Image (spheres, grey):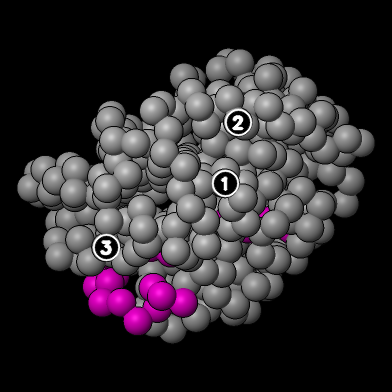
Amino acid sequence: MKIEALFVDSESAAEPEVERISTALGLVPRPVGSAREVFAAVQAAPDPVGAGKRMLYLTANRGAFIRDCPGTAHYTCCGYRILHVAAYCSMDCAYCILQSYFHPPVLTYFLNRGDLAAELQVEFDKQATQRFGTGEFTDSLIWEGVSPRNAELIHLFAAQDRCVLELKTKTTAIERLLPLAHRRRTILAWSLNRAATASRYERGTAGIDARLAAAARAAARGYPLAFHFDPIVIEEGALAGYLETIETLFSRIDAEQIVWISLGALRFMPALKAVIERRFPGTPLACGEFITGLDGKLRYFKPLRIRAYRAMAQAIRRRAPGVCLYLCMEDDEVWQEALGFVPGRRGGLAAMLDEAAVRVCGLAR
Ligand code: SF4
């Protein structure tokens, strides 16, 4: 994180974590009466979307920490539960939906960790299989340098037997997590891509080799792993690069350690197109053969998605026949054409993922 300005909501300024974060960043926090003051500072910058990545706002989450994945109408959703611990990201992927999701986007970190723990305890007490993750509105591990929150979450999950936590990242910031007693209740997950796509469109992230090296180190410490090929960017000659990444993955990682692998082709709301074109001039990213899906998002033409998924799924199944492989936000026709089945025939996608978590992470049934 390269933070240039630190703001704290004046009601939260006395929280002990404020001092720790300001020391870690070497910045004096500026108290503000409301988020509007931070937003004004961001909006005054020539590139507000970029500026929000270098300004950090510390505040309390006054809403719910736990939310259901919003999913998308007409497409199969995974039933994942979001832990809303922070917002936005210091890395800068050209396709990142967060650029147009928050208005304006500002790095935000929620200080009221006690409330988060209390909400989680209510969920743990339900004694039901559930999957949680912090990687929906931020990268899970960019906060490692400023906060011990991931370690705390890992300990909380390690103390129960029905739920798993997925920490999803494009970084290699696992050093402090490696020695923790996780009891396989935390899955460390990496977003993967073909190397050329990552270097072209994923500014500020760790390279694919470095991500896989970090994953191998995590596996050696007993962490269950997950991988997300998302977004798959369909360009001339790209498929060979994706197949190469799949080969590299399985040359380094034992398939038995993998809880699930997802595939998801690039998709985005139309509003993001203008942001991409403004912030990444000349990029070919948003110039593919897109159609508007039933949820209003732009997606590649269906036959192109099916072709890419099918080839990648075949390569993954050759190396890991038993791994839980799923598509992110696709309909039954694409599932059938690409993977040869529809989730409904296996109890639904959520049940498939729950079963994988039980099997690989050793959850109680
Ligand atoms: S790492 Fe994820 S959250 Fe961060 S900029 Fe890239 S896509 Fe967005």
Query: Can residue 31 be seen?
Result: yes
Give the residue at mark 3.
152
Q: Which quadrant: the C terminus?
A: bottom left
Which residue lies at the image location 34% right of the left edge and 36% below the top edge? 10
Say what secondary structure mark 1 lies in.
Answer: strand
Which residue lies at the image location 73% right of the left edge and 41% below the top edge? 94
Label 3 beta carbon less than 8 Å to ligand 1:
no
Q: Are marks 3 and 2 in contact (CB under 8 Å)?
A: no
Any mark on residue 41, and which?
2
Which residue lies at the image location 36% right of the left edge and 53% below the top edge? 18
Which residue lies at the image location 69% right of the left edge and 39% below the top edge? 50
Q: Nearer the viewer, mark 3 or mark 2?
A: 2
Q: Amino acid at mark 3?
A: Glu
Q: Which quadrant: the N terminus?
A: bottom right
Q: Amino acid at mark 1?
A: Ala
Q: Are marks 1 and 2 in contact (CB under 8 Å)?
A: yes
- Is residue 191 a member of the stretch shown in magenta? yes
Label 2 beta carbon less than 8 Å to ligand 1:
no
Tell me if 71 is positioned left or right of 270 in this view: left
Of callouts 1 and 3, which one flags the residue occurring earlier in the amino acid sequence? 1
Tell me if 48 is positioned left or right of 18 in this view: right
Q: Amino acid at mark 2?
A: Ala
Q: Position of residue 323 (x, y in %)?
A: 45, 62
Give the residue at mark 1.
5
| Separation of marks 1 and 3 at Cα, in angstroms | 26 Å
Query: Can residue 276 be seen?
Result: no
Q: Which residues are magenta?
A: 175-194
